[in-house]
């Protein structure tokens, strides 16, 4: 019997929005006033704040605005950034607001941060301070406040200070490397910047002399144009996202007509080759996958293999089991118990409410496979399907059980680990009955081998149209985002 596949609108697209929101925090920072006066370390602490407004577009359609205010203070700077976007996700209109206050030293290295992301149905916030190589974070959501200490590889530069650092250096090098921290993904990120030359851009009807900067963050490429004085006048991101310098009145009021852009329709992948009418019934699929560079790789596993561009995915047969909690050697078949049974900022495995709920769901079941199926069914039934742009914690989802596949996957992973069932997250694409692949997330559960399950779609195990592009922790989500907009899939054979 075919699984009851939930509607298209439940598949993941918030990851793309999330990354772009983070990119705006990084790269749409204006750094300079509309008079193009550079704000450098020598500015006196009593200097007036400077600000800039930018319109945010997808193609030619306006989807939001960004405003930044920079205040020089004794020993450094305070950056205040507010971004607003209005988008459509498969018929669901979403308004997204991010607010970020960042304090840096005179060389733009991060001292403290206060970040919030608000969207319909969800609000998350993070505050943090840096002391040498330790970032102390407080994370707040519907599930309350949790504390976390992150040991940094090196003190991160504020993302707002990237362009300012290059301006201070007089655009003197062809390439720059910066080390930053992203509060939305809660991870350190390297940012590579290449000075690609000089260009004249038409901004608000006038020619503007600029430096062209090419930036790369985990295979996601951005291009921005900056004046010699350091004013960012335009930026182009993947999938046609664009920001343009505008006066405040135009940024706030002009170009808002019509229905918002639907990002899912814009980035879905039309399947070529064999037509699949009922994806949920597919037990094996072979497909040619192109658009992945030599520096990127598709993970192989017990259920997915790669030979060149040919990807073979199949539903695992003869799924194993064992008695909970898992007690076998941690090196068995690639299992890392510390990671796949552990707790972190999003997967709150050691939280008392998560543990209590997980035990309630499995009701004393000690057979690992049966317990995994009980958890999968419970999440599918109890989490309301809707898009959420934020990355919710599992404790937030107990209080407010709604979200897309990110939410389903995070909650399942936490509940599974809480009863001693190793689990991790997979990210990739899944085929839907309309003939398009959509970006998606689902869990992998360890049953004497990794088994894909899908609590968003109600599948145990998941069908073979799930193509995994990355797996592991949330830190790996961005590994797949570089292929967005490039991926092409030609289905050769299905069973």
Image (tube, rainbow, N blue to C red):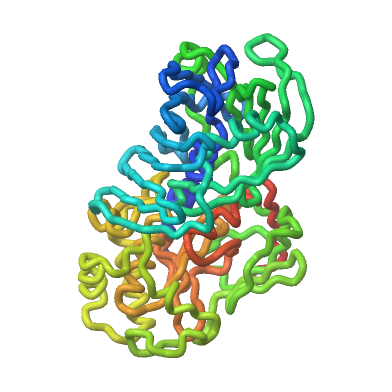
Q: Is residue 272 above or below residue 226?
A: below
- Which residue does the image show at 56% across and 53% down from the upper left? 478
Of residues 138 and 412, the one nearer the viewer is: 138
Vertical side of 466 occupied by 119: above or below: above
Quarter of the figure that contains the C terminus: bottom right
**Rendering coords of residue 398 (x, y %):** 25, 58
* Front one among 135 and 66: 135
Task: Say which residue appears at 54% left-offset and 37% top-offset.
Answer: 107
Is residue 461 something that shows in the picture?
yes
Quarter of the image for residue 198 reads top right
The mark total stands at 0
Q: Please indicate whether residue 125 sits to the left or right of residue 229 in the image.
A: left
x and y percentages locating residue 357 in the rendered image: 22, 68
- For the question of whether residue 86 can be seen, the reply is no
Question: Nearest the camera: 440 or 348?
Answer: 348
Image quadrant for the N terminus? bottom left
Going 41% across and 61% down the picture, which residue do you hit?
A: 409
- Relative placement, left or right, of 257 versus 240 is left
């Amino acid at each position: 019997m075919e699984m009851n596949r939930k509607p298209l609108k439940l598949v993941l697209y918030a990851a793309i929005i999330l990354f772009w929101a983070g990119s705006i925090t990084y790269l749409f920072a204006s750094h300079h006033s509309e008079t193009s006066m550079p704000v450098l370390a020598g500015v006196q602490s009593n200097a007036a704040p400077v600000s800039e407004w930018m319109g945010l577009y997808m193609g030619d359609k306006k989807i939001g605005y960004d405003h930044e205010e920079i205040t020089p203070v004794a020993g450094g700077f305070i950056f205040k950034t507010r971004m607003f976007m209005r988008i459509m996700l498969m018929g669901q209109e979403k308004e997204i607001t991010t607010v970020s206050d960042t304090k840096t030293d005179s060389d733009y290295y991060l001292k403290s941060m206060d970040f919030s992301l608000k969207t319909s149905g969800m609000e998350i916030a993070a505050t943090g301070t840096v002391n040498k190589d330790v970032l102390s974070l407080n994370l707040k959501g519907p599930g309350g406040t949790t504390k976390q200490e992150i040991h940094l590889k090196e003190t991160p530069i504020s993302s707002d200070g990237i362009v300012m650092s290059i301006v201070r250096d007089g655009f003197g090098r062809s390439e720059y490397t910066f080390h930053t921290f992203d509060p939305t993904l809660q991870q350190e990120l390297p940012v590579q910047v290449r000075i690609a030359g000089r260009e004249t851009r038409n901004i608000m009807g006038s020619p503007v002399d600029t430096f062209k900067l090419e930036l790369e963050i985990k295979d996601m490429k951005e291009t921005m144009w900056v004046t010699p004085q350091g004013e960012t006048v335009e930026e182009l991101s993947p999938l046609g996202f664009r920001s343009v310098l505008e006066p405040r009145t135009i940024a706030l009021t002009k170009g808002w007509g019509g229905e918002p852009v639907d990002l899912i329709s814009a980035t879905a992948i039309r399947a070529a080759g064999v037509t699949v009418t009922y994806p949920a019934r597919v037990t094996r699929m072979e497909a040619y996958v192109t658009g992945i560079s030599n520096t990127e790789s598709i993970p192989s596993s017990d259920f997915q293999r790669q030979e060149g561009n040919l990807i073979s995915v199949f539903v695992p047969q003869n799924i194993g089991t064992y008695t909970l909690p898992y007690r076998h050697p941690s090196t068995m078949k690639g299992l890392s118990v510390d990671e796949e049974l552990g707790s972190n900022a999003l997967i709150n495995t050691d939280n008392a409410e998560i543990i209590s709920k997980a035990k309630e769901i499995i009701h004393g079941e000690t057979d690992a496979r049966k317990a995994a199926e009980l958890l999968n069914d419970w999440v599918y039934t109890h989490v309301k399907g809707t898009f959420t742009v934020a990355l919710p914690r599992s404790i937030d989802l107990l209080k407010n059980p709604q979200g897309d596949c990110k939410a389903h996957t995070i909650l399942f992973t936490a509940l599974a680990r809480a009863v001693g069932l190793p689990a991790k997250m997979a990210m990739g694409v899944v085929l839907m009955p309309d003939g398009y692949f959509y970006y998606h997330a689902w869990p992998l559960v360890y049953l004497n081998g990794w088994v894909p399950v899908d609590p968003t779609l109600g599948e145990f195990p998941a069908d073979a149209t799930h193509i995994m592009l990355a797996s592991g922790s949330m830190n790996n989500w961005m590994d797949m985002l570089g292929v967005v907009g490039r991926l092409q899939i030609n289905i050769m054979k299905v069973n």
